[in-house]
Amino acid sequence: PATEGRRRREGRTTPGMLTSALASLGDQTPPRWVLPGVLLFAVLIRVLVSTHPHSGQGEPPMFGDYEAQRHWMEVTLNTPLSQWYVHTKVNDLQYWGLDYPPLTAFQSWICGVWMRAVEPGAVALTTSRGWETPVSKLAMRATVIASDLAFTLPATIAFVRAFYGEERGANANRMTWATALILLAPAPILVDHGHFQYNNWSLGLTTYAVAAIVRGRNVLGSVLFTAALCHKQMLLYHAPAFFAHLLGVCLRRGRGDARRAFVEVAKLGAAVVLTVALHLAPFYVADGAGVTGVAAVLTRLAPFKRGLFEDYVANFWCATSPIVKWRKLLSIQNAAKLSAAATTGAMAPAMYAQVRAPSAEGFLWCMACVSMSFFLFSFQVHEKSALLPALPVSMLCLRATGLATLAPVLVCVSMWPLLRKDGLGVAYVGCVVLFVALFGDGTAPERRKPPPPPSPKKRRWLPGWIPSPGKRRTTPEGDGGNDASDARDGNGGGGARRDEWAGAGPTERRGWIVAGRALAAVAVASHAWEAIGPPPP
Protein backbone atom coordinates (compact mmCIF):
# COMPACT_ATOMS: atom_id res chain seq x y z
CA PRO A 1 0.00 0.00 0.00
CA ALA A 2 1.06 3.55 -0.70
CA THR A 3 2.56 5.49 2.17
CA GLU A 4 1.26 8.92 3.09
CA GLY A 5 4.26 10.59 1.48
CA ARG A 6 3.75 8.67 -1.76
CA ARG A 7 0.04 9.51 -1.87
CA ARG A 8 0.85 13.19 -1.35
CA ARG A 9 3.45 13.16 -4.13
CA GLU A 10 0.93 11.50 -6.45
CA GLY A 11 -1.71 14.08 -5.50
CA ARG A 12 -4.17 11.50 -4.16
CA THR A 13 -5.01 13.25 -0.91
CA THR A 14 -7.41 16.08 -0.15
CA PRO A 15 -6.19 17.57 3.11
CA GLY A 16 -8.47 19.90 4.99
CA MET A 17 -7.75 23.51 5.76
CA LEU A 18 -6.49 22.73 9.25
CA THR A 19 -4.13 20.04 7.96
CA SER A 20 -2.76 22.40 5.32
CA ALA A 21 -2.26 25.16 7.88
CA LEU A 22 -0.39 22.88 10.25
CA ALA A 23 1.62 21.32 7.41
CA SER A 24 2.87 24.80 6.46
CA LEU A 25 4.78 24.83 9.75
CA GLY A 26 6.76 21.79 8.62
CA ASP A 27 8.53 20.05 11.47
CA GLN A 28 8.50 23.15 13.62
CA THR A 29 6.60 23.39 16.87
CA PRO A 30 3.47 25.52 16.32
CA PRO A 31 3.24 28.84 18.18
CA ARG A 32 1.85 28.68 21.70
CA TRP A 33 -1.36 30.40 20.65
CA VAL A 34 -2.40 27.61 18.23
CA LEU A 35 -3.90 25.21 20.78
CA PRO A 36 -5.68 27.99 22.75
CA GLY A 37 -6.91 29.26 19.40
CA VAL A 38 -8.38 25.83 18.61
CA LEU A 39 -10.09 25.74 22.00
CA LEU A 40 -11.52 29.25 21.58
CA PHE A 41 -12.75 28.36 18.09
CA ALA A 42 -14.46 25.24 19.48
CA VAL A 43 -16.20 27.38 22.10
CA LEU A 44 -17.19 29.94 19.45
CA ILE A 45 -18.87 27.24 17.34
CA ARG A 46 -20.82 26.13 20.39
CA VAL A 47 -21.94 29.68 21.09
CA LEU A 48 -23.09 30.12 17.49
CA VAL A 49 -25.06 26.86 17.52
CA SER A 50 -26.72 27.91 20.78
CA THR A 51 -28.34 30.86 18.97
CA HIS A 52 -30.53 28.40 17.03
CA PRO A 53 -33.83 26.92 18.29
CA HIS A 54 -33.90 24.28 20.99
CA SER A 55 -36.03 21.17 21.30
CA GLY A 56 -39.74 21.78 21.82
CA GLN A 57 -39.43 25.56 21.50
CA GLY A 58 -42.92 27.04 21.73
CA GLU A 59 -44.60 23.62 21.51
CA PRO A 60 -46.89 23.06 24.51
CA PRO A 61 -47.94 21.12 26.48
CA MET A 62 -44.77 18.97 26.85
CA PHE A 63 -42.33 21.19 24.94
CA GLY A 64 -39.06 19.16 24.71
CA ASP A 65 -35.72 18.24 26.25
CA TYR A 66 -34.98 21.89 27.00
CA GLU A 67 -38.09 22.00 29.18
CA ALA A 68 -37.13 18.67 30.77
CA GLN A 69 -33.76 20.06 31.86
CA ARG A 70 -35.36 23.26 33.14
CA HIS A 71 -38.05 21.30 34.97
CA TRP A 72 -35.46 19.13 36.73
CA MET A 73 -33.80 22.29 37.99
CA GLU A 74 -37.19 23.43 39.28
CA VAL A 75 -37.84 20.13 41.07
CA THR A 76 -34.40 19.72 42.62
CA LEU A 77 -34.39 23.29 43.90
CA ASN A 78 -37.87 23.35 45.42
CA THR A 79 -38.57 19.84 46.74
CA PRO A 80 -36.83 17.67 49.35
CA LEU A 81 -34.18 15.32 47.99
CA SER A 82 -36.26 12.32 49.06
CA GLN A 83 -39.00 13.42 46.61
CA TRP A 84 -36.92 14.03 43.50
CA TYR A 85 -37.77 10.64 42.01
CA VAL A 86 -41.17 10.21 43.69
CA HIS A 87 -44.57 11.21 42.32
CA THR A 88 -46.14 13.96 44.44
CA LYS A 89 -48.60 16.80 43.96
CA VAL A 90 -45.81 19.18 42.96
CA ASN A 91 -43.65 16.59 41.17
CA ASP A 92 -45.76 14.95 38.49
CA LEU A 93 -43.58 12.19 37.07
CA GLN A 94 -45.74 12.14 33.94
CA TYR A 95 -44.46 15.64 33.17
CA TRP A 96 -40.75 15.12 32.56
CA GLY A 97 -40.11 13.23 35.77
CA LEU A 98 -36.44 12.59 36.54
CA ASP A 99 -35.42 9.36 34.81
CA TYR A 100 -31.63 9.66 34.87
CA PRO A 101 -29.17 8.60 37.62
CA PRO A 102 -28.32 10.76 40.66
CA LEU A 103 -25.47 12.75 39.15
CA THR A 104 -27.90 14.22 36.62
CA ALA A 105 -30.12 15.30 39.52
CA PHE A 106 -27.19 16.93 41.32
CA GLN A 107 -26.14 18.62 38.07
CA SER A 108 -29.70 19.97 37.72
CA TRP A 109 -29.54 21.34 41.26
CA ILE A 110 -26.20 23.08 40.59
CA CYS A 111 -27.47 24.64 37.37
CA GLY A 112 -30.76 25.50 39.08
CA VAL A 113 -28.93 27.57 41.71
CA TRP A 114 -27.44 29.61 38.86
CA MET A 115 -30.81 29.95 37.15
CA ARG A 116 -32.48 31.13 40.35
CA ALA A 117 -29.80 33.81 40.77
CA VAL A 118 -30.32 35.04 37.20
CA GLU A 119 -34.11 34.75 36.86
CA PRO A 120 -36.00 33.23 39.82
CA GLY A 121 -39.22 32.86 37.86
CA ALA A 122 -37.55 30.40 35.49
CA VAL A 123 -37.35 27.75 38.21
CA ALA A 124 -40.41 28.67 40.32
CA LEU A 125 -42.28 25.58 41.49
CA THR A 126 -45.32 24.64 39.32
CA THR A 127 -45.59 28.12 37.74
CA SER A 128 -42.58 27.99 35.43
CA ARG A 129 -43.64 25.30 32.98
CA GLY A 130 -42.73 26.26 29.44
CA TRP A 131 -40.64 29.22 30.62
CA GLU A 132 -38.72 30.50 27.59
CA THR A 133 -37.77 34.12 28.18
CA PRO A 134 -34.64 35.41 26.37
CA VAL A 135 -32.75 35.87 29.65
CA SER A 136 -33.54 32.37 30.87
CA LYS A 137 -32.52 30.86 27.52
CA LEU A 138 -29.22 32.71 27.65
CA ALA A 139 -28.61 31.50 31.21
CA MET A 140 -29.52 27.91 30.30
CA ARG A 141 -27.22 27.93 27.28
CA ALA A 142 -24.42 29.32 29.44
CA THR A 143 -24.63 26.30 31.75
CA VAL A 144 -23.99 23.93 28.82
CA ILE A 145 -20.99 25.95 27.64
CA ALA A 146 -19.64 26.02 31.20
CA SER A 147 -20.03 22.24 31.31
CA ASP A 148 -17.94 21.93 28.15
CA LEU A 149 -15.27 24.13 29.70
CA ALA A 150 -15.22 21.90 32.78
CA PHE A 151 -15.42 18.50 31.09
CA THR A 152 -15.14 18.26 27.30
CA LEU A 153 -12.20 20.58 26.61
CA PRO A 154 -9.81 19.57 29.42
CA ALA A 155 -10.75 15.88 29.12
CA THR A 156 -9.93 15.92 25.39
CA ILE A 157 -6.55 17.53 26.02
CA ALA A 158 -5.81 14.98 28.76
CA PHE A 159 -6.70 12.09 26.46
CA VAL A 160 -4.69 13.33 23.48
CA ARG A 161 -1.61 13.85 25.64
CA ALA A 162 -2.01 10.44 27.26
CA PHE A 163 -2.71 8.41 24.12
CA TYR A 164 -0.82 10.25 21.38
CA GLY A 165 1.78 12.15 23.37
CA GLU A 166 4.24 9.27 23.46
CA GLU A 167 3.65 7.70 20.05
CA ARG A 168 6.66 7.29 17.79
CA GLY A 169 7.13 10.50 15.82
CA ALA A 170 4.62 12.46 17.88
CA ASN A 171 4.61 16.22 17.48
CA ALA A 172 2.49 19.17 18.50
CA ASN A 173 0.95 19.50 15.02
CA ARG A 174 -0.56 16.01 15.12
CA MET A 175 -1.78 16.44 18.68
CA THR A 176 -3.37 19.80 17.86
CA TRP A 177 -5.07 18.23 14.84
CA ALA A 178 -6.41 15.37 16.96
CA THR A 179 -7.68 17.75 19.64
CA ALA A 180 -9.46 19.86 17.05
CA LEU A 181 -11.12 16.87 15.39
CA ILE A 182 -12.52 15.53 18.66
CA LEU A 183 -13.75 18.96 19.83
CA LEU A 184 -15.29 19.96 16.49
CA ALA A 185 -17.20 16.73 15.84
CA PRO A 186 -20.58 18.19 14.89
CA ALA A 187 -22.98 15.72 16.53
CA PRO A 188 -22.20 16.43 20.21
CA ILE A 189 -22.27 20.17 19.52
CA LEU A 190 -25.66 20.00 17.82
CA VAL A 191 -27.21 17.80 20.51
CA ASP A 192 -25.92 19.67 23.56
CA HIS A 193 -25.91 23.26 22.30
CA GLY A 194 -28.72 23.02 19.76
CA HIS A 195 -31.21 20.36 20.84
CA PHE A 196 -30.17 21.06 24.47
CA GLN A 197 -28.77 18.41 26.77
CA TYR A 198 -25.80 17.89 29.07
CA ASN A 199 -24.12 14.90 27.42
CA ASN A 200 -20.82 16.72 27.89
CA TRP A 201 -20.84 15.68 31.57
CA SER A 202 -21.03 11.94 30.92
CA LEU A 203 -18.94 11.92 27.73
CA GLY A 204 -16.36 14.20 29.34
CA LEU A 205 -16.08 11.94 32.38
CA THR A 206 -15.71 8.95 30.05
CA THR A 207 -12.91 10.72 28.18
CA TYR A 208 -11.20 11.47 31.50
CA ALA A 209 -11.58 7.79 32.42
CA VAL A 210 -9.99 6.61 29.16
CA ALA A 211 -7.08 9.02 29.66
CA ALA A 212 -6.54 7.67 33.19
CA ILE A 213 -6.63 4.05 32.04
CA VAL A 214 -4.21 4.74 29.20
CA ARG A 215 -1.86 6.20 31.83
CA GLY A 216 -2.20 2.99 33.83
CA ARG A 217 -4.32 4.56 36.59
CA ASN A 218 -7.04 1.94 36.48
CA VAL A 219 -8.67 2.64 39.83
CA LEU A 220 -9.05 6.33 38.98
CA GLY A 221 -10.36 5.40 35.54
CA SER A 222 -12.92 3.06 37.09
CA VAL A 223 -14.12 5.80 39.46
CA LEU A 224 -14.45 8.34 36.64
CA PHE A 225 -16.32 5.98 34.33
CA THR A 226 -18.66 4.91 37.13
CA ALA A 227 -19.36 8.60 37.77
CA ALA A 228 -20.20 8.96 34.06
CA LEU A 229 -22.54 5.98 34.37
CA CYS A 230 -24.14 7.65 37.39
CA HIS A 231 -24.85 10.67 35.19
CA LYS A 232 -26.49 8.85 32.27
CA GLN A 233 -27.35 5.18 32.15
CA MET A 234 -26.78 5.08 28.39
CA LEU A 235 -23.05 4.95 29.21
CA LEU A 236 -23.75 1.26 29.74
CA TYR A 237 -22.95 1.12 26.02
CA HIS A 238 -19.27 1.47 26.99
CA ALA A 239 -19.34 -0.56 30.21
CA PRO A 240 -18.56 -4.00 28.64
CA ALA A 241 -15.47 -2.56 26.96
CA PHE A 242 -14.20 -1.13 30.26
CA PHE A 243 -14.95 -4.42 31.97
CA ALA A 244 -13.19 -6.56 29.34
CA HIS A 245 -10.11 -4.34 29.11
CA LEU A 246 -9.63 -3.97 32.87
CA LEU A 247 -10.24 -7.68 33.43
CA GLY A 248 -7.61 -8.47 30.82
CA VAL A 249 -5.18 -6.07 32.50
CA CYS A 250 -5.80 -7.67 35.91
CA LEU A 251 -5.24 -11.16 34.49
CA ARG A 252 -2.05 -10.00 32.79
CA ARG A 253 -0.74 -8.46 35.99
CA GLY A 254 -1.57 -11.67 37.82
CA ARG A 255 0.72 -13.58 35.42
CA GLY A 256 -0.88 -16.89 36.25
CA ASP A 257 -1.21 -16.08 39.96
CA ALA A 258 -4.95 -16.36 40.61
CA ARG A 259 -4.66 -14.71 44.01
CA ARG A 260 -2.89 -11.64 42.66
CA ALA A 261 -5.36 -11.35 39.78
CA PHE A 262 -8.24 -11.60 42.26
CA VAL A 263 -6.76 -8.77 44.34
CA GLU A 264 -6.47 -6.56 41.24
CA VAL A 265 -10.08 -7.26 40.28
CA ALA A 266 -11.24 -6.69 43.86
CA LYS A 267 -9.61 -3.24 43.97
CA LEU A 268 -11.46 -2.16 40.84
CA GLY A 269 -14.71 -3.69 42.02
CA ALA A 270 -14.44 -1.88 45.34
CA ALA A 271 -13.83 1.41 43.53
CA VAL A 272 -16.96 0.89 41.43
CA VAL A 273 -19.15 -0.12 44.37
CA LEU A 274 -17.98 2.78 46.53
CA THR A 275 -18.57 5.28 43.72
CA VAL A 276 -22.11 4.02 43.16
CA ALA A 277 -22.76 4.01 46.89
CA LEU A 278 -21.53 7.59 47.17
CA HIS A 279 -24.06 8.68 44.56
CA LEU A 280 -26.95 6.75 46.11
CA ALA A 281 -26.17 7.47 49.76
CA PRO A 282 -27.98 10.85 49.88
CA PHE A 283 -31.22 9.15 48.81
CA TYR A 284 -30.76 6.47 51.45
CA VAL A 285 -30.33 8.92 54.33
CA ALA A 286 -32.72 11.67 53.13
CA ASP A 287 -35.71 11.84 55.51
CA GLY A 288 -34.87 8.33 56.67
CA ALA A 289 -36.05 6.84 53.35
CA GLY A 290 -33.59 3.95 53.53
CA VAL A 291 -33.85 1.26 50.86
CA THR A 292 -37.13 2.75 49.63
CA GLY A 293 -35.35 5.95 48.66
CA VAL A 294 -32.72 4.05 46.67
CA ALA A 295 -35.40 1.88 45.03
CA ALA A 296 -37.27 5.01 43.94
CA VAL A 297 -34.18 6.11 42.02
CA LEU A 298 -33.45 2.73 40.43
CA THR A 299 -37.01 2.07 39.26
CA ARG A 300 -36.96 5.31 37.23
CA LEU A 301 -33.94 4.26 35.17
CA ALA A 302 -35.39 1.36 33.13
CA PRO A 303 -37.11 2.46 29.86
CA PHE A 304 -38.80 -0.88 29.08
CA LYS A 305 -42.25 0.65 28.72
CA ARG A 306 -41.13 2.70 25.70
CA GLY A 307 -40.73 -0.23 23.31
CA LEU A 308 -38.02 -1.69 21.07
CA PHE A 309 -36.96 1.58 19.42
CA GLU A 310 -37.97 5.22 19.41
CA ASP A 311 -38.75 7.57 16.51
CA TYR A 312 -36.51 7.11 13.44
CA VAL A 313 -33.30 5.78 14.94
CA ALA A 314 -30.79 4.39 12.44
CA ASN A 315 -30.42 0.93 13.99
CA PHE A 316 -31.25 -2.60 12.86
CA TRP A 317 -34.73 -2.83 14.37
CA CYS A 318 -35.97 0.46 12.95
CA ALA A 319 -34.35 -0.10 9.53
CA THR A 320 -35.93 -3.53 9.12
CA SER A 321 -39.32 -2.63 10.65
CA PRO A 322 -40.92 -1.80 7.25
CA ILE A 323 -40.33 -5.46 6.30
CA VAL A 324 -40.57 -7.20 9.67
CA LYS A 325 -43.15 -5.69 12.03
CA TRP A 326 -41.15 -6.30 15.19
CA ARG A 327 -43.51 -4.38 17.47
CA LYS A 328 -46.46 -6.51 16.37
CA LEU A 329 -44.61 -9.82 16.34
CA LEU A 330 -42.86 -9.50 19.71
CA SER A 331 -44.05 -8.58 23.16
CA ILE A 332 -41.90 -6.16 25.10
CA GLN A 333 -40.41 -9.01 27.13
CA ASN A 334 -39.53 -11.09 24.05
CA ALA A 335 -38.19 -8.05 22.21
CA ALA A 336 -35.92 -7.28 25.18
CA LYS A 337 -34.63 -10.88 25.21
CA LEU A 338 -33.99 -10.90 21.46
CA SER A 339 -32.19 -7.55 21.50
CA ALA A 340 -30.07 -8.68 24.46
CA ALA A 341 -29.02 -11.84 22.64
CA ALA A 342 -28.20 -9.96 19.43
CA THR A 343 -26.21 -7.29 21.29
CA THR A 344 -24.25 -9.86 23.27
CA GLY A 345 -23.36 -11.84 20.16
CA ALA A 346 -22.24 -8.73 18.30
CA MET A 347 -19.94 -7.41 21.01
CA ALA A 348 -18.53 -10.71 22.32
CA PRO A 349 -15.55 -11.00 19.88
CA ALA A 350 -14.22 -7.53 20.69
CA MET A 351 -14.58 -8.14 24.43
CA TYR A 352 -12.86 -11.52 24.21
CA ALA A 353 -9.93 -9.99 22.35
CA GLN A 354 -9.40 -7.45 25.12
CA VAL A 355 -9.59 -10.06 27.85
CA ARG A 356 -6.96 -12.13 26.03
CA ALA A 357 -4.66 -9.31 24.90
CA PRO A 358 -5.51 -5.91 26.45
CA SER A 359 -3.96 -2.83 24.87
CA ALA A 360 -4.67 0.88 24.89
CA GLU A 361 -5.60 1.08 21.21
CA GLY A 362 -7.51 -2.19 21.36
CA PHE A 363 -9.47 -0.73 24.27
CA LEU A 364 -10.69 2.13 22.07
CA TRP A 365 -11.59 -0.24 19.23
CA CYS A 366 -13.45 -2.38 21.75
CA MET A 367 -15.36 0.68 22.96
CA ALA A 368 -16.32 1.46 19.37
CA CYS A 369 -17.41 -2.12 18.58
CA VAL A 370 -19.35 -2.62 21.81
CA SER A 371 -21.16 0.73 21.69
CA MET A 372 -22.02 0.22 18.02
CA SER A 373 -23.40 -3.23 18.90
CA PHE A 374 -25.62 -1.62 21.51
CA PHE A 375 -26.71 1.10 19.08
CA LEU A 376 -27.58 -1.37 16.33
CA PHE A 377 -29.23 -4.14 18.33
CA SER A 378 -30.11 -3.14 21.90
CA PHE A 379 -33.53 -2.36 23.32
CA GLN A 380 -35.03 1.15 23.19
CA VAL A 381 -32.35 3.05 21.30
CA HIS A 382 -32.69 6.80 20.75
CA GLU A 383 -31.15 8.84 17.92
CA LYS A 384 -28.81 10.55 20.39
CA SER A 385 -27.31 7.19 21.34
CA ALA A 386 -25.19 7.45 18.18
CA LEU A 387 -22.96 9.82 20.18
CA LEU A 388 -21.58 6.84 22.09
CA PRO A 389 -19.89 4.91 19.25
CA ALA A 390 -18.84 8.22 17.72
CA LEU A 391 -16.71 9.12 20.77
CA PRO A 392 -14.14 6.27 20.60
CA VAL A 393 -14.01 6.51 16.80
CA SER A 394 -13.10 10.19 17.11
CA MET A 395 -10.50 9.29 19.71
CA LEU A 396 -8.86 7.02 17.13
CA CYS A 397 -8.45 9.95 14.76
CA LEU A 398 -4.69 9.43 14.27
CA ARG A 399 -5.06 5.66 13.94
CA ALA A 400 -8.04 5.50 11.57
CA THR A 401 -8.28 8.97 10.09
CA GLY A 402 -10.58 8.08 7.23
CA LEU A 403 -13.11 6.49 9.56
CA ALA A 404 -12.72 9.21 12.19
CA THR A 405 -13.55 11.96 9.69
CA LEU A 406 -16.42 10.03 8.07
CA ALA A 407 -18.19 8.75 11.19
CA PRO A 408 -19.06 12.19 12.70
CA VAL A 409 -20.77 13.17 9.45
CA LEU A 410 -22.71 9.90 9.27
CA VAL A 411 -23.81 10.31 12.89
CA CYS A 412 -25.24 13.74 12.03
CA VAL A 413 -27.01 12.29 9.00
CA SER A 414 -28.55 9.57 11.19
CA MET A 415 -29.88 12.24 13.58
CA TRP A 416 -31.45 14.38 10.85
CA PRO A 417 -35.09 13.58 11.80
CA LEU A 418 -34.42 14.83 15.33
CA LEU A 419 -32.49 17.92 14.22
CA ARG A 420 -35.08 18.80 11.58
CA LYS A 421 -37.87 18.59 14.16
CA ASP A 422 -35.93 20.99 16.38
CA GLY A 423 -35.39 23.53 13.58
CA LEU A 424 -31.63 22.97 13.53
CA GLY A 425 -31.27 22.46 9.78
CA VAL A 426 -29.04 25.50 9.21
CA ALA A 427 -26.84 24.69 12.20
CA TYR A 428 -26.58 21.07 11.01
CA VAL A 429 -25.45 22.05 7.52
CA GLY A 430 -23.02 24.64 8.85
CA CYS A 431 -21.36 22.29 11.36
CA VAL A 432 -21.01 19.44 8.86
CA VAL A 433 -19.62 21.66 6.08
CA LEU A 434 -17.17 23.28 8.51
CA PHE A 435 -16.00 19.87 9.75
CA VAL A 436 -15.43 18.56 6.22
CA ALA A 437 -13.66 21.77 5.18
CA LEU A 438 -11.29 21.64 8.16
CA PHE A 439 -10.38 17.95 7.98
CA GLY A 440 -10.91 17.03 4.32
CA ASP A 441 -10.29 13.36 3.60
CA GLY A 442 -8.71 12.81 6.98
CA THR A 443 -5.11 13.43 5.98
CA ALA A 444 -3.31 14.17 9.24
CA PRO A 445 -0.05 16.11 9.70
CA GLU A 446 3.01 13.93 9.16
CA ARG A 447 5.00 12.42 11.95
CA ARG A 448 8.25 13.99 13.05
CA LYS A 449 10.30 10.93 12.08
CA PRO A 450 9.65 8.23 9.50
CA PRO A 451 8.25 5.02 10.99
CA PRO A 452 9.98 1.65 10.81
CA PRO A 453 9.07 -0.62 7.88
CA PRO A 454 5.90 -2.69 8.39
CA SER A 455 6.22 -6.25 9.59
CA PRO A 456 4.83 -9.14 7.52
CA LYS A 457 1.11 -9.70 7.62
CA LYS A 458 0.13 -12.39 10.12
CA ARG A 459 -2.80 -14.74 10.25
CA ARG A 460 -5.84 -13.40 12.04
CA TRP A 461 -7.92 -15.57 14.38
CA LEU A 462 -11.06 -13.44 14.08
CA PRO A 463 -12.20 -11.31 11.14
CA GLY A 464 -12.01 -7.54 11.15
CA TRP A 465 -9.84 -5.43 13.41
CA ILE A 466 -8.86 -8.07 15.99
CA PRO A 467 -5.29 -9.49 15.80
CA SER A 468 -4.09 -12.79 17.20
CA PRO A 469 -4.05 -12.53 21.01
CA GLY A 470 -0.73 -12.07 22.71
CA LYS A 471 1.16 -11.27 19.49
CA ARG A 472 2.46 -7.86 18.50
CA ARG A 473 1.29 -7.04 15.04
CA THR A 474 1.99 -4.16 12.69
CA THR A 475 0.16 -3.85 9.40
CA PRO A 476 0.49 -1.48 6.45
CA GLU A 477 -0.66 2.07 6.57
CA GLY A 478 -4.37 2.79 6.44
CA ASP A 479 -6.36 5.45 4.68
CA GLY A 480 -5.62 8.97 5.76
CA GLY A 481 -1.89 8.80 6.32
CA ASN A 482 -1.43 6.86 9.54
CA ASP A 483 1.75 4.85 9.18
CA ALA A 484 2.28 1.62 11.02
CA SER A 485 3.45 2.14 14.57
CA ASP A 486 2.90 0.58 17.93
CA ALA A 487 0.19 2.05 20.15
CA ARG A 488 1.23 2.84 23.67
CA ASP A 489 -0.31 0.41 26.14
CA GLY A 490 -0.98 2.43 29.28
CA ASN A 491 -1.36 -0.74 31.35
CA GLY A 492 1.97 -2.24 30.55
CA GLY A 493 0.60 -4.46 27.79
CA GLY A 494 1.93 -5.01 24.32
CA GLY A 495 -0.82 -3.47 22.22
CA ALA A 496 0.20 -2.80 18.63
CA ARG A 497 -1.02 -0.47 15.95
CA ARG A 498 -3.52 -2.01 13.56
CA ASP A 499 -4.61 -0.84 10.19
CA GLU A 500 -7.88 0.99 9.96
CA TRP A 501 -9.63 -1.84 8.12
CA ALA A 502 -7.30 -4.82 8.48
CA GLY A 503 -7.79 -7.54 5.91
CA ALA A 504 -8.88 -5.18 3.15
CA GLY A 505 -6.55 -4.04 0.37
CA PRO A 506 -5.78 -0.35 -0.17
CA THR A 507 -8.14 -0.09 -3.16
CA GLU A 508 -10.97 -1.77 -1.31
CA ARG A 509 -10.33 0.30 1.80
CA ARG A 510 -10.34 3.57 -0.07
CA GLY A 511 -13.35 2.47 -2.09
CA TRP A 512 -15.42 2.04 1.06
CA ILE A 513 -14.32 5.44 2.34
CA VAL A 514 -15.14 7.13 -0.97
CA ALA A 515 -18.53 5.39 -1.13
CA GLY A 516 -19.32 6.46 2.42
CA ARG A 517 -18.35 10.04 1.74
CA ALA A 518 -20.41 10.10 -1.44
CA LEU A 519 -23.52 8.82 0.36
CA ALA A 520 -22.97 11.27 3.21
CA ALA A 521 -22.54 14.14 0.73
CA VAL A 522 -25.80 13.25 -1.03
CA ALA A 523 -27.65 13.02 2.29
CA VAL A 524 -26.27 16.31 3.61
CA ALA A 525 -27.05 18.05 0.31
CA SER A 526 -30.64 16.84 0.37
CA HIS A 527 -31.00 17.88 4.00
CA ALA A 528 -29.51 21.28 3.20
CA TRP A 529 -32.06 21.78 0.43
CA GLU A 530 -34.83 20.73 2.80
CA ALA A 531 -33.60 23.11 5.52
CA ILE A 532 -32.62 26.13 3.43
CA GLY A 533 -34.35 25.74 0.09
CA PRO A 534 -37.81 27.01 -0.82
CA PRO A 535 -40.78 25.23 0.77
CA PRO A 536 -42.63 22.68 -1.39
CA PRO A 537 -45.68 23.99 -3.22
Image (tube, rainbow, N blue to C red):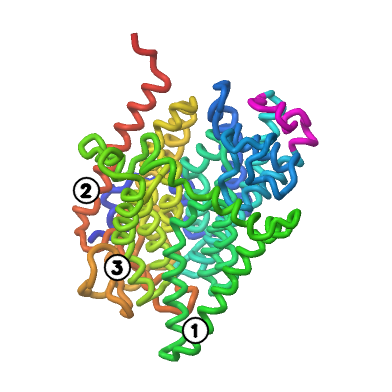
Q: Reading the chain from its start, which is encountered first: label 1 or label 2?
A: 1
Q: Label 3, on which residue?
A: 466
Q: Label 2, on which residue?
A: 511
Q: Determine whether label 1 and label 3 are within 8 Å by CB.
A: no
Residue 431 x/y as whole percent? 47, 35
Marker disc for residue 262: 1
Residue 477 x/y as whole percent? 30, 62
* CA distance for labels 2 and 3: 21 Å
Residue type at mark 1: give it: Phe
Count all numbered tags in the image, as a single digit: 3
* CA distance for labels 1 and 3: 27 Å
Q: Reading the chain from its start, which is encountered first: label 1 or label 3?
A: 1
Tell me the quarter of the image containing the C terminus.
top left
Residue 418 versus residue 272: which sits nearer the camera?
Answer: 272
Which range of residues does the magenta coloring cover?
115-132
* CA distance for labels 1 and 2: 47 Å
- Figure check: 62 above or below 365: above
Residue at point 65%, 48% (across, down): 105
